[in-house]
Image (tube, rainbow, N blue to C red):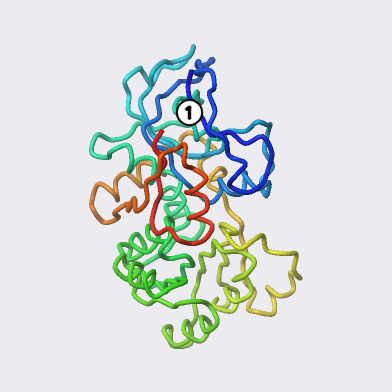
Amino acid sequence: MSKAIRIHANGGPEVMKWEDIPTPEPGPGEVSIKQEAVGLNYIDVYFRTGLYKAPNMPLIIGQEGAGTVTAVGAGVTDLKAGDRVAYAGALGGYASDRAIPADKLVKLPDAIDFKTGAAMMLQGMTAQYLLHRTYAVKKGDSIVVHAAAGGVGLILCQWAKHIGATVIGVVSSDEKAELARANGAHHTVVGYSNLVSEVKRITGGAMAPVVYDSIGKDTFATSLDCLAPLGLMVCYGAASGPVPPFDLGVLAAKGSLFLTRPSLATYTAKTADLRTVSASLFEVVASGAVKIQVNQTYALKDAAAAHIALESRKTTGSTVLVP
């Protein structure tokens, strides 16, 4: 038998139950892995609460992890037992063992340990596509990054600085501002009540070509006002709740703005894209230009406590759960 956190109904952290499950066997095109570490992400909260619809109940949430291949199913030729692997974007992560489609996995370089691997895949690959494909950040750009001291935020700050952009990090406390600055943010703004005027001051009135907003409802209108004409509003999360319907004419009135709601699943749907995105991430981490900060570690059985900390904005950087 294996162990897993399962939910039988949507709700608060208390709906997550630590239960015995049969050890999964790999089907055709799958491998089974013993998980060494599991990543914690806000998308886990969305599935737990029901904001994102569960494919079935009971549900094992969790989208990210790293571990060792224990068995391979029929038709799998590029992985073998003993391989170190990592993944993101495959439900079923909150478990000691799991089966997973082989094409969702990438081999984890020896230089990257399991905790770092589990902590970096979803957040790191999200940062990669946001900076390189959703909007191709270039040297000299001034960009706005919400939740700059969070998991994706710290990676965005470091990577964008490495590219040569000026990073304006938005945070919720002075302590988080200090952390964001230590990780590449050139300017920090605590709260968003004066964010627009600060962006105007920092950019000399030019405003930003792109805003990366993972907060959602509470910051959406303010983020739009931080954009230059023809700027791109990137809503890649909704920590404060989903953005309500709004009049598209607002985009025209504020300067023919662009708006996107991207997801990692789309950007890595093709195996070739997954390999490209992950290789780019591994390269920048191995170079030392981006450091993955695992600032919280919980036992997997204590996932409820980890969710409470995440939702109350008490975490910084990445959090991993250890089976």
Could you tell me how many numbered marks the image carries?
Answer: 1
Residue 127 at x, y percent in the picture:
43, 54
Residue at 62%, 36% in the rendered image: 7
Residue at 50%, 34% in the rendered image: 93
Residue under pointer 1: 103
Residue in front for this viewpoint, 247 or 190: 190
Residue in front for this viewpoint, 187 or 143: 187
Residue at 37%, 46% in the rendered image: 297
Name which residue type carries label 1. Asp
Residue in front for this viewpoint, 308 or 81: 308
Mark 1, other Cα within 10 Å: few <14 / some 14–19 / many ≥20:
some
The quarter of the picture where residue 244 lies is: bottom right
The quarter of the picture where residue 233 lies is: bottom right
Residue in front for this viewpoint, 64 or 22: 22
Residue 145 at x, y percent in the picture:
46, 67
Residue 220 as seen in the image, left or right of residue 74: right
Vertical arrangement, residue 288 with respect to residue 170, above or below: above
Residue 65 at x, y percent in the picture:
43, 36
Vertical arrangement, residue 27 with respect to residue 101, above or below: above
